[in-house]
Amino acid sequence: MTATVAPAARIPGALPLPDLYARVSRHVPAIEWPALAPDIEAILRLKRERNAVILAHNYQAPEIFHTVADIVGDSLALAREAVTVDADVIVLAGVHFMAETAKLLNPSKTVLIPDMGAGCSLADSITAEDVRGLRKKYPGVPIVTYVNTSAAVKAESDLCCTSGNAVAVVRSLNAPRVLMIPDEFLAQNVQAEVPDVEILTWAGHCEVHERFTPADIRDVRESYPGVTVIAHPECPPDVVAESDFSGSTAMMMDFVVQKRPSQVVLVTECSMADNIAAQNPDIEFIKPCNMCPHMKRMSLSNIRRSLETLTHEVTVDPALADRARAAVERMLAVRTR
């Protein structure tokens, strides 16, 4: 395990786009930059020509997150910002359910995802038919669905939540019993914060976060005494219990920036640490972390191709779009403290 922070790179004056390179110089070797710069220049031009914006999740690689993205954030932030973007075209640098959510909130705009294969293990873990079965099994119990799901699943739900507002959403229902799907670990971690509500779960897991163990945390603490450990609530509850703080990716970023620990471990996807480290060189980020293979399907080259060819366009079946949109809008109406 090594720190992700490296000495500041020397930026040769001959490098293209030197101001943009300065943002990512700690994570992109100078020798690689000339190969990336043409795609970045083309993306910036195409955004102007297409009246397009790029929404990028916090798990995107630094060369996307810090150079071509217009709006960055966690799932909740991207959903909120998607409502207000002033553009004809939205490119979602993330995974498919995020692009679907953007389309639900912007039905008249063209929404693109550079790679249709950018899926999600949580979204794949449950179907609309499964939700209908839960309604029959638990009549009258409200269903809160994590945004990491398909539009078809959202359409069968009462409202959605993200890891950042899940507790507030559950509390907003004022119900003694709630179904929270599909992330079992998120539901269990929310249960710990809302003990007066019985939360029924579904056995879906994030393939990035489910692999972390309490032993990983203990090993890091042994190797780096005094390190601050921050875990995502998609991690198993025993991992969260071993950590100093747990929260969504946006909450993780806020914690690091505000508390400024000298050494920190982010128990989540690897690019999170890279993206925060790029703007906070005085903080040492220690790994372990796990890579999300779906998020890493995004690249500068396929973002460029997406804008050039207006592919791949994301659509939502009109038969379910209104119901799915309502579930997302109910979530957005819930304000966290």
Image (cartoon, rainbow, N blue to C red):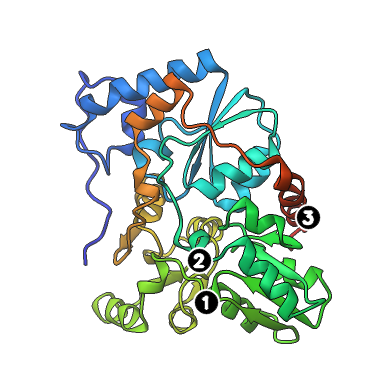
Which amino acid, by three-letter code, is at mark 3? Answer: Arg
- The answer to whether the residue labelled 1 contacts the one labelled 2, judged by CB atoms less than 8 Å apart, is yes
Mark 1, secondary structure of its residue: loop
At 38% from the left and 40% from the top, the residue drawn is 298
Cα distance in 3D space between marks 3 and 2: 23 Å
Mark 3 packing: few (<14 Cα in 10 Å), some, or many (20+)? some
Nearest to N terminus: mark 1 or mark 2:
2
> Compared with residue 141, is residue 119 higher up or lower down, i.e. above or below?
above
Residue displayed at 44% across by 51% down: 119
Picture quadrant where residue 168 is located: bottom right
Q: Which mark is residue 330?
A: 3
Quarter of the image with the C terminus in it: bottom right
State the residue position of label 2: 125
Question: Residue 291's spot in the image, x, y percent?
Answer: 33, 58
From mark 1 to mark 2, how far is it between C-alphas?
8 Å
Q: Amino acid at mark 2?
A: Ser
Q: Position of residue 76 (x, y in %)?
A: 62, 52
- Can residue 284 be seen in the rendering of this structure? yes
